[in-house]
Amino acid sequence: MISLISIWAIPAFLLFIPVYGAFRKVKVYECFVEGAKEGFQVGIRIIPYLVAILVAVGMLRGAGAIDILARWLDPLLRGVGLPAEILPLAIMRPLSGSGSYGIVTELLKTHGPDSFIARLAATAYASTETTFYVLAVYFGAVGIKKARHAVVAGLFADIVSLFAAVFICRLVFSS
């Protein structure tokens, strides 16, 4: 039954919207085109912010700055139980979702999907956010210029999430 509902839920929803609109005497097609125009304009507005953050992330990775910072922070975080292999992910995650996904994929290939490092990487990836990406794209799209408190709050949440992931993974997966 659940499988049947999951197969037909989206087509039924897509059929329901124009039928309900016609019932309410709304010009459904014109509303759809107007919404598409607004979506396109938002897309054009966020492209410069998106390009800027992707170029910055590419430059940091290409120059090896993230690896250097990871080696520099390794002794400090080793004391709290964070493996050195996770540091590039912890540094990259606030900057780029795709970049951090690449790091998680590499950790899975290197250490195996059932290893503690892979499980911690997956948990940390899922529990943290691409803070700078979100701030650049979404704040840029709506014109917010002063984001300093949001940056601090977002990075604090990322750090807490990372250490919570370490705690939970050590509790659940350590043998």
Image: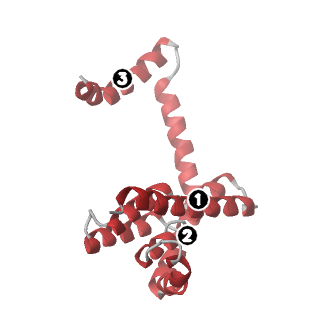
Q: Amino acid at mark 2?
A: Ile
Q: CA distance from mark 1 to mark 2?
A: 9 Å
Judging by the rendered image, the residue that carries numbered circle 2 is 53
The residue under the point 52% across, 48% down is: 40
Which quarter of the figure has residue 149?
bottom right
Measuring from the top left, give residue 94's x and y in whole percent.
54, 66
Measuring from the top left, give residue 100's x and y in whole percent.
43, 68
Measuring from the top left, give residue 124's x and y in whole percent.
45, 61
Q: Amino acid at mark 1?
A: Val
Of labels 3 and 1, the one closer to you = 1
The residue under the point 23% across, 29% down is: 3
Q: CA distance from mark 2 to mark 3?
A: 38 Å
Measuring from the top left, give residue 137's x and y in whole percent.
58, 59
Judging by the rendered image, the residue that carries numbered circle 1 is 137
Q: Which quadrant is the C terminus positioned in? A: bottom left
Q: Is residue 92 above or below residue 64?
A: above
Q: Amino acid at mark 3?
A: Leu
Crowding around mark 2 (Cα neighbors within 10 Å: few <14, some 14 to 19, many 20+) is some
